[in-house]
Image (cartoon, rainbow, N blue to C red):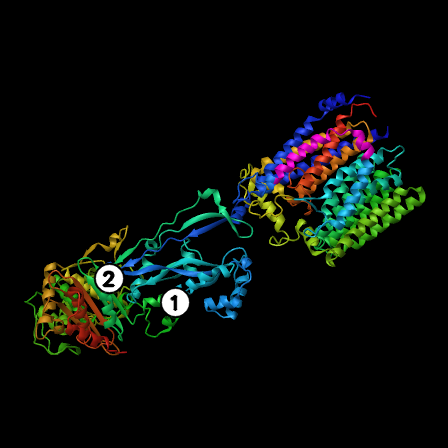
Amino acid sequence: MVTRESNNRGIFLSLDWFTIGLYVILLFWGWFSVCGACYDYHHPDLFSFNLNSGKQFVWILTSLLLAGALLLIEKRFYYKASMVVYVMMMLILLLTIFIAPDTKGSRSWIPIGPVKLQPAEFAKFAVALAVGKFMERYGFRLSNYKDFLRTCALFLLPMLLIIGQRETGTALVYLSFFLVLYREGMTGSVLFAAFMLVVYVVVGVKFGDEMVTGMPASLGESWVLFLSLLSTLFLTWRYCKDSRLLAGAAGYSLGFTLGAYLFSAYVIPFNICIVQLIINAGIIVYLGFEYAVTKSYRYVLIILFLLTSTFVYYTCDYVFSHNVLPVHQQTRIEVLLGKNDDVRSAGYNVNQAKIAIGSGGFSGKGFLKGTQTKLKYVPEQETDFIFCTIGEEEGFLGSAGVLIVYLLFIWRLIILAERQPDTWGRVYGYSAVCVFLFHLFVNIGMVLGLTPVIGIPLPFFSYGGSSLWGFTLLLFIFLRMDAERNFKQK
Amino acid sequence: MKAYEFERRQYVIAGIALLVVVAYIIRLAFLQLVPNDYEEISRNNAIYNKIIFPSRGSIYDRNGKLLVYNEPAYDVMVITREIGDLDTLDFCRTLHISREEFDERMAWIKNTDKNPGYSSYSQQLFRPQISSADFLVFQEKMFRFKGFYVRERNARQYRYPNAAHVLGYVAEVSGNDIAENDYYNAGDYIGKQGVERSYEQVLRGQKGIEVLLRDARGKIQGKFNDGLDDQQPIPGKDIVLSLDIELQALGERLMRGKRGAIVAIEPATGEILCMVSSPTYSAFDMVGKERGEKIMNMLKDPDHPMFNRAISGTYPPGSTFKPSQALTFMQEGIIQADVTSYPCTGGFRYRNLKVGCHSHPSPLSVKPALSTSCNGFFCWGLYYMFGNRSKYASVQDAMTRWKDYMVSMGFGYKLGIDMPGESRGMIPNAEYYDKHLNRWNALTVISIAIGQGEVTLTPLQIANQGATIANRGYYVTPHVVKRIVGGEIADSLQRRHYTKVNSAYYEEVVSGMRGAVTSGIGTCRGAQNPWYEVCGKTGTAQNRGHDHSVFMGFAPKNNPQIAVAVYVENGGFGATFGVPIGSLIMEQYIRGELSAASQTRASAIANRSIY
């Protein structure tokens, strides 16, 4: 056991200053962006507490203090306290639903004195600690479905609680823990299946109303059926290698599909989707036969996948033609898929964001010179749409620069996570990686019009104390863990 | 250890991060590096070019009397979002509107189909041009009417009701104006008719632009680029008319109840001293909200009060045309003053053709012919000119020669006055007759010698002929603007135009026209007065209805100060209306006032209505 003094000096030397450097760069780059976004022509003092830039400056200073304080707390404290922290956090999340006042439909903000805090932003580190601690347990096996489900429950519970606060965007962040589980050994087919389901929804909704050239068949429907056939065949080949019948099944099904297409295109036009449905049904029969022979549960899962795939299109079709979703959510999806071009109503945000970024050009309009953001043409320009300000004022250089610094940051965190001596540290590190990656992917994707408009902040850039503190907590607990990597275990 | 199996999955996760970042950078490149309109769209979003209107130049008469000026007009504006507890009853009472009008206007403002520029954050026009009295009361109470503002702007005001045709008026631009000139935007004001139109560029000045930043709600947030792109407005220049407003007022009074025109010119400069077209309208009608309606009514009026007869009306000049003939014949050597005499036995008779004349001594030479306005003499002159085969190879050649003289005297083409709507009148040429007649000779076209037939002139051209004779052979392009304050009037308005006739021949015509006033058989005896020497020529232009009464004259005979033409439609003999109106105009201008006897005559004429 090392003494406390040498311990702390050791921490100072083994801290990852590279990551801290990137953190400081992002923090101050973020502050300049908030300045650009909230600049008030009538009160040009950026440090004024009436402005968000002044407030954000205070949040940044307090975050630096918080970071310093976190570096003093030893890893073993978290090891002991992680479950307690988790439980307390869940209670706070639950409590928030009932005590938070209604703010624009959301019940996630708790006013404390002059500021408002959003507990959902602080919960991430607690969940990461708990998931890591749980997986560190002796005898834990992810392939054991009970262990798997319990792990999932650890991050799906806060997700549900946050949905209860009407903060769907923040809740979705917890899905990124699936990527952590993937690193820890969860089968990749889950990610593949999830990815394919997203593809089906996109293709199905976007092309559902279009017709295949020259025949009475929906383009979207036909593509979804064809893609689900292909991915089923792929999964069968990838996870059930011993299948001798696969080549035949693949040959027949693809051959029939091609034949039906050519017949419809050149001889008598008919709805080829019917043939495709029959072929998919045939594949199910074939897989069922294989299951009967091999008793491998994987065939059942693949059958389930194919069934889901086939019905995803019809579900989407039903949802969109029967207005199951609230109108604003439906239009958001339609805008994203380019089906709704009404730039004055639903597409307004995304369109103005595009104008802001596009008008920045190569080198941008210059600090405080952006008009799209400052004059409030872009909504939420200080928080969720902060990337617009970077695009407008700093141009391609600045916005691509931010992305590259983020890539370095995430890449560095992956290296740090991989060098952890224990599962707990690694899982915690990957949790941070995946949470940052998810925020980056969704937030900037939304601003660029590539992902749906989901209101989550861009870490270190978006205005807001809760998210800044939340991300600082998440990061610096990990940096302290990392600094202790060479210490003897307990 | 099991975890090693999955160690390579770190590359999958790093790969996802790399893929996301690369995809987003490509997307950024498409948005920011590929040429696009985003820059312009963002400019259009944020930049509001607030136009600063320059003050429009004032208009003065030749004696420095203010005729047209600007006066603040007050529009009531509203920012609908700011309306609080409004005492609608009190508000409506203050503006003298009904509750229904209030509701109707509010509904109109908020209807983005009808009012596409609507924003609840920016000022919307609630009621234009309230009276100064209403404004004063409204201003007192404004603190109670939250959300309502008053916008001050300039509106044209007139000091005199006179000279409406010359002044023209200012009104909102039409679609055509905007299409023709990109200086104008919808809602701008532009000069219509008169000098407001012809001197539009001088009077209006140049708009300034304040480049402002406007936020998404339409609220102004400050100046763009610290105001470096702003342009200061250039105020319009004042102009001084050559009109004498007192003379103009007298002319309009004398023409009351008659159709026709008066034009008076200062011969040495071409400056128009008065220009009356009757019936006319009051310049005061061109102000305020009801202008459009009043103009529509006038356009429907069968007497066409909006039509400026002085420069747009074309009339047969009748005998006022004869001096031009005398000058042509003398210059061409067809007649010689005091030598050549033609007989007139009750007119011009040739075989079956007869052009009637009144009784006077016969035969007679050019001066008495002018004094008595003998038709026979001028018909014979034209007959001998057109028939002279030793001078002209054909009648066409003679006709062309004749036409060249007429054109040199300012007939047949626009004189180029600085006002819109001038007509050119009609001087026939040889091609015209070749086209319309099978065979023709002097006899066929003989009536052009006495200002009838195909010949038509504008009252301006008749007055200009008077000025040319007064100048003994030249005229300066007639114009109504004497001076631009801080500017120059066009060179074309200051140029002398010499006719093809020597000034010596003009002296003969001058004494003939003087004789018309002085001799016992002269047609203009009514113009004789004890103060100065008047030269005159009457005309009684034949017409399908009652004859037109015409007068052309100038005074004094030496160093003339004024040349005048009077045209009274269906006024009968030239001596009936033309001569007395012309003399009164000359008297007023030369003496600065009318004698008591003249006052009486003026009232008598003013009270005679002939249509």
From the image, tell me which residue sits under label 2.
B243
Pick out the residue farthest to the front.
A113
Mark 2: amino acid:
Leu
- Camera-side residue of A448 and A168: A168
- Residue B303 coordinates in the image, percent (x, y): 32, 74
Based on the picture, tell me whether residue A291 belongs to the magenta stretch: no
Q: Quadrant of residue B4?
A: top right
Mark positioned earlier in the residue sequence (1 or 2): 2
- Location of the N terminus of chain B (image quadrant): top right
Based on the picture, tell me whether residue A73 belongs to the magenta stretch: yes
- Location of the C terminus of chain B (image quadrant): bottom left
- Looking at the picture, does residue A305 appear above or below residue B21? below
- Camera-side residue of A204 and A356: A356
Q: Please give the name of the residue rendered at 75% of the width and 20% of the height, measured from the top-left corner.
A: A6
Res. B15 in view: no
Q: Is residue A153 left or right of residue A71?
A: right
- The label shown at residue A260 is none
- Looking at the picture, does residue A78 appear above or below residue B197? above
Res. B528 in view: yes
- Residue B487 coordinates in the image, percent (x, y): 28, 50
Q: Dot 2, how many residues are within 10 Å of its Cα: few (below 14), some (14-19), or many (20+)?
A: many
- Camera-side residue of B175 and A18: A18
Main secondary structure type of the part rendered in magenta:
helix
- Looking at the picture, does residue A73 appear above or below residue B118? above
- Camera-side residue of B88 and B214: B88
Host chain of mark 1 = B
Q: Is residue B597 left or right of residue A293?
A: left
From the image, tell me which residue sits under label 1.
B291
Host chain of mark 2 = B
Q: Which residues are magenta?
A: A55-81
